[in-house]
Image (tube, rainbow, N blue to C red):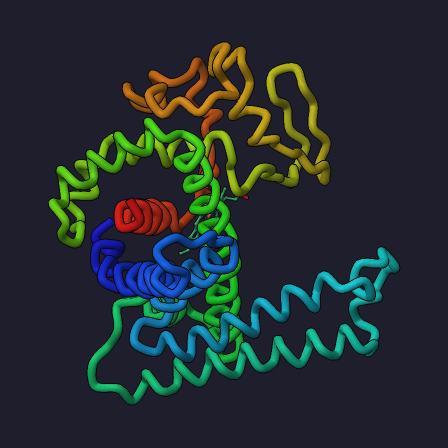
Amino acid sequence: MDKVKGMMNLIVESTFTLVDSWKTRIEVEGGLADIEIDEYMRSFSGDVISRACFGSNYCKGEEIFLKLRALQEAMSKKGLSTGVPRMRYLPIKSNREAWELEKEVRDLILHVVKERKGAATYEKDLLQMVVEGAKSSDLSQEATERFVVDNCKNIYLAGYETSTVSATWCLMLLAANHERQHNVRTEVVEICGGGTPDAGMLRKMKLLTKVIQESLRLYPPVAVVSREALEDMNFGEIFVPKGVNIWMMVLALHTDPEIWGEDAYKFNPNRFAKGIKGACKLPQVYMPFGVGPRVCLGQNLAMVELKLLMSFLL
Ligand code: HEM
């Protein structure tokens, strides 16, 4: 959490950019504007992740980020998803495009790392943490570079779409529930008094926290989580042979009336009034950020990002 506190200013800057662009649109359109928020939310969370990952080099981060998005699109093109074995190794156009983008992303990331080696001050961003993680292990030069590049790509991919989707649903729920929106706004105004929220203020925003928790329950951005059994396993009376993939339907677990009660499909932030344990019969099934050893590494950052964004907009 302390590391996230150090990133709050970066998130505030991204939030200002978003709020300013909406203010301008509203002014241009005479005081009232119909804004489709999808692309704005994408830019916002892309901006946050670029700043969190690359600190003051975030412009370079945004360049990398745009290439990663293009790479995601290239990878999802038909040629790569025909199901034909080894297709992804053939030098067809879409594969060549993806390989080229992968190389560009790798070169850009390693260029930033190289630039930092000669710098007098050092950044406290995610890239620096990854670089230090690589340094403390006993890896060859090639493996170190792969470690840094792969981790940067992972952070981008894991933290971009998830935050975009969460923010979008949370805003949709508040837009559709005027009374709750009014109550959360009152809370935010009382706590911040028109100023920029700091970590202490965000902690005090109990209702906003509940709204975000409830939004993540009803619309978990990672709706399905899977695991492969690496050996034969027994879960009670269920036998799972080695190699079988187990899929956990997070959305179904989050909305099961037997676990959450009759109002399982309703937006009711107050169900979290006594924490997750008080909200349902089986608290372990609430897993918007996953569970266990592979739980989301960015969950504190994501919560701060969502709270800051919501409190500024409200
Ligand atoms: C509301 C936003 C977010 C949600 C709902 C979310 C959700 C998740 C979930 C469910 C997992 C576990 C997947 C599994 O068990 O297979 C996960 C993993 C991960 N998340 Fe997030 N995430 C969010 C934001 C972020 C952000 C902002 C970052 C980066 C700064 C991030 C970085 C990661 C990483 C690196 C992992 C992999 C951890 C590992 O495999 O050890 N996430 N996330």
From the top left corner, tell me how far across and down residue 29 is, in percent. 41, 61
- Quadrant, the C terminus: top left
User: Is 311 placed above or below 147 here?
Assistant: above
Relative placement, left or right, of 143 versus 9 is: right
User: Is 13 placed above or below 304 here?
Assistant: below
User: Is 111 placed above or below 128 here?
Assistant: below
Residue, x 70% and y 68% (percent of image)? 74
Q: Which residue is nearer to you in this view: 120 or 51? A: 51
From the top left corner, tell me how far across and down residue 253 is, in percent. 55, 24
From the top left corner, tell me how far across and down residue 81 is, in percent. 80, 58
Res 52 seen here: no
Relative placement, left or right, of 156 versus 75 is: left
Residue, x 68% and y 77% (percent of image)? 99
Relative placement, left or right, of 188 versus 179 is: left
Res 71 seen here: yes
Report the residue that reaches farthest toward the front. 30
Residue, x 42% and y 74% (percent of image)? 61
